[in-house]
């Protein structure tokens, strides 16, 4: 009886949730960190999606989201050559909803792209956060645990993530990085900072530090990509394994202990 009354309620709830997950919300959740709140992109670093003729093709957008994209592109006379990671966390239906939303944006937004946000981070603070000399406010791991940056820190740091020496050049400078760091698209980093996000000030400081580093040490980018993608996947596996071990070794609760006493 209870079940029967519950059913329509659950259906209504599911419907309400589905409506809330519209293309615009999903875009803000998954894409805005890189492509910008207005889908305006960052000239020379991340292509705009509003007013982009290729984005009229919904199937193309869904494909890019699911499979990622790299290599040279040209949008409205500006060239891009970056890497968009595949986003398996976005379902086919969600990608479709985002594609529909973006199609509606094209044209109207094209004439007046919003200026990139002006952030001013403190590179010295960023350096201390990167090295773990100053802890992150929400308790996230210091970047050096996984990354290297040329010439900084003892032996340069971890080798799981990519060398970040030229990250600022490829990922939209200080503004692009500040957004990216607050909502990382890479599975390993998403996992590592889940529930422990960087604050905006921390992200801006780290971005400023990486911009400073990239200006000091020029070097080619693409060399590292393949190797580090593999390392990232391996690390994700290790993290999951570690969680599984923690779960098995968890202290037994009082209730469990009493139960096993009673059984004897
Ligand atoms: C980590 C940053 C990042 C995220 C997050 C991201 N993108 Fe991208 N996207 C890029 C970059 C960089 C390129 C350009 C790749 C290239 O130069 O080949 C790109 C390219 C594209 C293109 C191709 C544009 C063209 O002109 O052909 C589409 C479409 C696209 N992204 C849609 C999306 C959607 C939709 C989302 C959210 C579900 C998203 N992107 C999330 C960085 C990102
Ligand atoms: C748990 C390990 C881990 C931690 C901690 C971590 N990262 Fe990452 N990061 C990765 C992985 C893995 C990638 C995915 C690409 C790769 O393999 O390099 C990545 C990617 C990046 C990228 C994009 C690299 C590129 O050039 O495409 C940036 C920028 C970045 N991280 C910055 C940071 C910063 C800043 C911190 C500290 C707040 C940090 N990361 C902490 C593992 C980590």
Image (cartoon, helix red, strand yellow):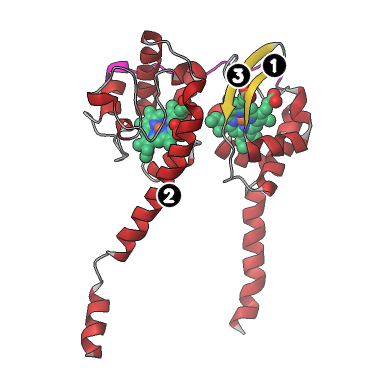
* Numbered tag placed on residue 40 in the rendering: none
Does the magenta segment cover residue 53? no
* Numbered tag placed on residue 74 in the rendering: 1
Of badges 2 and 3, nearer the viewer stands 2
Give the class, few, some or many, for how many residues have Cα within 10 Å of label 2's Cα (few <14, many ≥20): few
Pointers 1 and 3 in contact (C-beta within 8 Å):
no
Rendered view: 146 above or below 253: above
Q: Is mark 3 within 8 Å of ligand 1?
A: yes
Magenta-tinted stretch: 107-124
Quadrant in the picture for residue 107? top right
Mark 2 or mark 3: whose residue is earlier in sequence: 3
Q: CA distance from mark 2 to mark 3?
A: 30 Å
Does the magenta segment cover residue 112? yes
Residue at x 29%, y 34% (from the top left corner): 136
* Residue indicated by mark 2: 237
Q: Is mark 2 within 8 Å of ligand 2?
A: no
* Numbered tag placed on residue 81 in the rendering: 3
Rendered view: 8 above or below 228: below
Q: From where the camera sits, is residue 182 visible?
A: no
Q: Is mark 1 within 8 Å of ligand 1?
A: yes
Residue at x 24%, y 34% (from the top left corner): 135
């Amino acid at each position: 009886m209870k079940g029967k009354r519950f059913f329509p309620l659950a259906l209504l709830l599911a419907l309400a949730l589905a409506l809330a997950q519209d293309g615009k919300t999903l875009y803000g959740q998954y894409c805005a960190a890189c492509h910008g709140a207005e889908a305006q992109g960052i000239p020379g670093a991340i292509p705009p999606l509003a007013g982009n003729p290729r984005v009229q093709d919904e199937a193309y957008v869904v494909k890019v989201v699911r499979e990622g994209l790299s290599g040279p592109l040209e949008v409205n006379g500006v060239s891009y050559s970056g890497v968009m990671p595949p986003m398996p966390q976005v379902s086919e239906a969600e990608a479709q909803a985002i594609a529909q939303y973006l199609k509606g944006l094209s044209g109207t937004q094209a004439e007046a792209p919003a200026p990139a946000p002006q952030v001013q981070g403190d590179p010295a603070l960023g350096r201390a956060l990167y090295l773990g000399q100053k802890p992150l406010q929400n308790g996230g791991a210091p970047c050096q645990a996984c990354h290297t940056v040329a010439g900084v820190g003892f032996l340069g740091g971890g080798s799981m993530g990519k060398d970040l020496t030229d990250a600022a050049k490829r990922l939209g400078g200080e503004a692009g990085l500040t957004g990216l760091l607050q909502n990382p698209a890479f599975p390993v980093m998403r996992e590592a900072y889940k529930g422990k996000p960087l604050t905006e000030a921390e992200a801006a400081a780290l971005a400023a530090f990486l911009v400073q580093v990239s200006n000091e040490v020029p070097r080619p980018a693409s060399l590292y990509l393949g190797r580090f993608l593999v390392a990232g996947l391996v690390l994700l596996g290790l993290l999951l394994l570690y969680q599984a071990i923690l779960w098995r070794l968890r202290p037994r609760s009082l209730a469990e202990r009493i139960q096993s006493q009673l059984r004897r």
